[in-house]
Image (cartoon, rainbow, N blue to C red):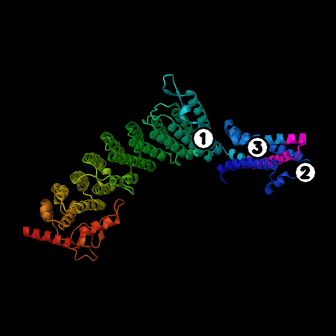
Amino acid sequence: MSQFSLYQYGKLGFWAAIGVILVAAIGITLGELGIYLTSLSILVQDPSNGFFESSLNLILSIISLVFLVVIFLLQNANQEYSSRLSSVILHDKYFLWTIGFILTASIFNISGSYFSWGPPLTVIGYAFSISTALLVGALIAFAGYFIDISNIIDYITEDLKQQISQDRIYRTTFLGTSLQDEDYVSKLNTDAQLIVSTCIQAIEQNQQNVVNSCLDALTEIVKKYLKETDDSEVNDDFINELNDQFQFIGAAAFDDYTRQKYSESVVETVGDIGLAITKDRELGTPGSRWANLLKSQFEDSLEFDRTAAAHIALRKLGEMSTTAILNGDLDSYRVYQGKTDSLARLCATASDSFLANLLQNAHLQYQRMYVTFLRMLCTEGYAPDTDVSMLFDDFAESFNQAKENYDFYTNQVLYAALFGLEPFAARVGGELQQHQGLDPATQRSIADYLSELIDFLRRISLQSPEHNHKDIYKGYTQFLFALENSSPVDEDIKKSLLSDLNNNFTNLIKHEYTNSLEESDNLDLDINRRITDFYAMLIYFYQDDPDALATFITPLVELYTNLADSYPSPDTVNNRTLHQLYQELKIFGAWISQFHDPENVCPELMDVLIENFEEIDTSTTRFYTSTLERYDYPTNTFDYRGGWWLRPDAIWSNRFQENISDTLNGDGNYYQQFHEELRDRQEDGS
């Protein structure tokens, strides 16, 4: 039996008692009219002598029980919480009606005993006695319900919600304008403070269910208040006062190490109220106070290690930000995003796993804000450029700050937020996929937004690149896939965006190779794997567009030429490093040769491949050699039926992996044929 159902059972007992009286009254009335029903005839038979005296004793005993129950409730409520809670039961109409019913029954039976009443009044006395016995169960149910402070809070909340209305909140002035009634708002503040004080006491006494009831109650009251007040309200006394009260609730939750779990519920409620204000106000200025409170509680929570309050604060700030964007309330958005940014910078200051996870959460909120801007642009046809640019400025700054301060392991957490199981590219692609067929003007705006995204990727990859995690290469491939498959822009705009992405990627490769060559150090093989995947995808997507292929491949060819001229080091580590880049160019040439003559697509590529061709002798190798290894192609790829295999990723499907791999590998003979063509042309040239 749930606590709430006890109140319902009490009501049921009360109406059952009323039913007994009605049945008796119906029986007497029908008897007076000469109508007798067999089922009711038992009520009018001769009663026993002394009935009223016996029933009176029963009723007086029940009256004593009533007073004991009331006193017990008063004492119980006064032990730990405000005395105002103990009086709530005395305002419940069903409880008062029950008391009134019992008193009426006792007065009736006292009169019957004094005047020696006989039939048919003895029937009424009998009905009162039965009803009073039934009300014992009702009293027990009411007592069971109101003995729980959580139920009292729920009861108060429902009563307040019924009272809150525009007619009470506003009064009309002699000029015909409506102003808030200060007296009513003051009374509402007083009622809310009772719930607040109960919440603080419950936190201090470790009463989780009472805390939850109080916080839920305050949220419901605010939502009802917002619904009944003007959307244009900016400086609201009730909302402001409640914000102050939540300062005290938060202080209680963060006051002691043993109370830190309560902080999660407190922060969640603060965020819910801030979100409700943002939704229901035309201008969410009052929400800024709740954003400040979330920021303050985030900072307070950093002293504790067993609470997720900081994560909740970031999530709620993100929800408030995206809601403000959708409402077109950019002033409020800037406030909320500014709070998120200050917290993100705080998390980026030191290499700590907890701070890294918090920064990951903050960057997730940034991603959601950007996706919301995209949605706003696609659905409404307008969204501000400056806010998106500033969003990425803050995003890149905290990311790069963390990149420089974090160690290798915390950096993994940082990059996982953008390129992990739920990559940023997938969020962007998923949103854009829903908005195809946009008008030209909107397409141009979308292109501007995507250009900002590509520039953001440039900034986090090319600023302090020595601190990059290798997942940055995976990120470029993810965005390539998302932009190609989801961008609702025409082909020329898309190619321009991908050209910018490709140029940034080439500059990133330049840094990696230059650093490796200057240090005469081996290059991480996983980087070359990612390079292969990126250009494989470009060649696959633009296999029928030789001009686009030339645009994408030529910068990489020029990079190789410049590096080879700058670091001529035969038979050294540098030579092996340069040869790895040569192998990349060679496999790209082999793939292009399936669709076009590489000489017509990119003559510079063929010149480099022929000039630097080397025959690899694998005849003495005792182990199995794959086709790629045998013909001097990159050996750092996954082997798939003797050829290349696209690495799996969360953003593309297994079927796509199979399609691109099967297409580029062809029948497997192209690798040998292209290798032999290069050898023959080198021999012819010599």
Residue 184 against residue 462 in the figure, above or below: above
Upstream in the sequence, badge 1 or badge 3? 3
Please indicate, yes or no, whether residue 363 appears anywhere in the rendered image. Answer: yes
Secondary structure beneath dot 1 equals helix
Q: Residue at x 39, y 39 (%)?
A: 333
Type of residue at label 2? Ser
Sort mark 2 into few (<14), some (14-19) or many (20+) by Cα contacts within 10 Å. few
Residue labelled with disc 1: 157
Residue labelled with disc 3: 69
Residue labelled with disc 2: 48
Q: Is residue 1 left or right of residue 680?
A: right
Q: Disc 2 versus disc 3: distance between alpha carbons?
A: 32 Å
Residue 406 lies, in percent from the top left, at 38, 49
Q: Is residue 92 left or right of residue 245?
A: right
Of residues 29 and 173, the one drawn nearer to the viewer in this rendering: 29
Of residues 232 and 351, the one drawn nearer to the viewer in this rendering: 232
